[in-house]
Amino acid sequence: MTYKGYMPRFIVLLALTLAPTILRAQERRPVKVRPAAVEVKMIPSDELMLPAAFQVSLYENLIDQLQKKRVFQTVYRDGDRNAETVAELTTLECTVLKLKKGSEMLREVTTVAGATSMTLRCELRDSNGDALWVRDISGKVRFFGASLKATYDFAKKAAAQIDRDLQSANS
């Protein structure tokens, strides 16, 4: 008895066995193009009572860090009319999940208490509204500095994380 008759069957069986694995691997790695422009939406303070100073500082620091790191070619502010003409505009929406406003004086007196921390959910959406990227990012100030320094820490981490994730998606 020869094995010639079994070889084609074996190859077909092997292909059918490996096909779902290969297809799943391709699904996990979709081809993505780095977005050229983003519109940063104003951070709402509806659900969690966010002081106005924190709200403005979060927004301004986020825009500043995205521009400094050159994550996108163009960064638009919420409501910018120039953004309406961009074909593949992505939007960045952040929502405050947690805010623990510490005490600057307590931080300076005792370096173990009075920390300010915040966690925001950031969502990068394409022009159809589909989520491209979602992360929870925290900002903190533990030792010296004003409580608003946590907003700078958040913005710096958010811009770096978006940049890293978009680079890894494109490689």
Image (cartoon, rainbow, N blue to C red):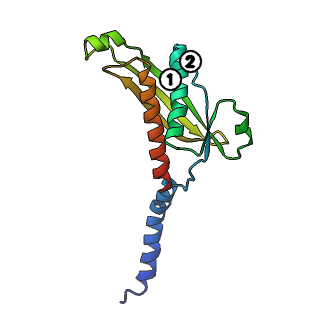
**Contact between labelled residues 1 and 2, with CB atoms less than 8 Å apart:** yes
Residue under the image location 55 percent in, 17 percent down:
47
Locate residue 34, reporting x and y percent: 56, 50
Locate residue 168, reporting x and y percent: 45, 51
SS type, badge 2: loop
- Dot 1: few (<14), some (14–19), or many (≥20) neighbours within 10 Å? many
The residue labelled by disc 1 is 96
Q: On the picture, is 54 further left or further right than 103?
A: right
Name the residue nearer the viewer: 147 or 5.
147
Residue under the image location 32 percent in, 21 percent down:
142
Locate residue 11, reporting x and y percent: 44, 76
The residue labelled by disc 2 is 45
Instruction: Calculate the distance from the C-alpha at mark 2 to the C-alpha at mark 1.
Output: 7 Å
- Which label was assigned to residue 164? none
Pointer 2 or 1: first along the chain: 2
Picture layout, residue 133 above or below residue 101:
below
Name the residue nearer the viewer: 85 or 108.
108
Q: On the picture, is 110 further left or further right than 128?
A: left
Picture layout, residue 78 above or below residue 100:
below
The amino acid type of the residue labelled 1 equals: Val
Residue under the image location 41 percent in, 27 percent down:
139
Q: Is residue 167 visible?
A: yes
Q: Which quadrant holds residue 86?
A: top right
